[in-house]
Image (tube, rainbow, N blue to C red):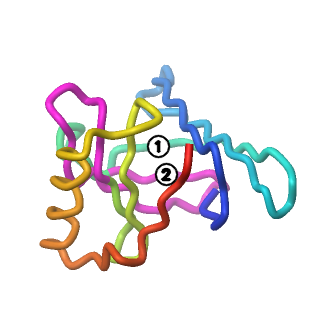
């Protein structure tokens, strides 16, 4: 569910018996005035410790889901798609410490992402 103008976006992850990961994304679209939900499957592309995954909400179409950086406690992550067009700063909380945000933004900039294009959600 990659759409603009979404609010209250949450994702829940759970491990499936076959080793894949189920992801459920929920959000509210104020333009359409409705709640939205998408369920997808995440698979590792290679070694499970590399952070290179693929996610599919509409099988059999898989999109890259690359973990670029993660904090030591697994509370915050910097994730991208296959190129420089999609980038997410993810948090287990409704906010992220400023130092973690700056760390991720610096990493993204060093990789070539245009962080001025990021859309920030209000919670």
Q: Looking at the image, which residue sits at the far right?
A: 33
Q: What kind of element bears circle 2? A: strand
Q: Looking at the image, which residue sits at the far top?
A: 17
Residue 104: name its quadrant. bottom left
Q: Quadrant of the N terminus?
A: bottom right
Provide the residue span drawn in magenta: 53-78
In magenta stretch: residue 63 = yes
Q: What residue is disc 1 on? A: 42
Prevailing SS of the magenta stretch: strand
- Percent position (x, y) of residue 13? 49, 30
In magenta stretch: residue 73 = yes
> Which one is earlier in the sequence, the residue at label 2 or at label 1?
1
From this view, report whether residue 113 is shown above or below residue 99: below
Q: What kind of element bears circle 1? A: strand
In-front residue for pair 17/112: 112
Q: What residue is disc 2 on? A: 55
In-front residue for pair 110/1: 110
- Percent position (x, y) of residue 107? 15, 62
């Amino acid at each position: 569910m990659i759409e603009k103008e979404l609010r209250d976006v949450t994702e829940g992850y759970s491990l499936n018996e076959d080793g894949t990961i189920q992801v459920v994304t929920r959000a509210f679209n104020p333009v359409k005035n409705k709640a939205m939900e998408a369920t997808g499957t995440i698979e590792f592309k290679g070694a499970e410790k590399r952070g290179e995954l693929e996610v599919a909400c509409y099988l059999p179409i898989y999109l890259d889901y690359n973990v670029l950086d993660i904090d030591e406690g697994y509370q915050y992550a910097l994730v991208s798609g296959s190129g420089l067009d999609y980038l997410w700063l993810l948090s287990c909380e409704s906010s992220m410490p400023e130092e973690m945000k700056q760390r991720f933004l610096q990493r993204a900039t060093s990789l070539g992402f245009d962080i001025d294009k990021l859309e920030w959600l209000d919670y």
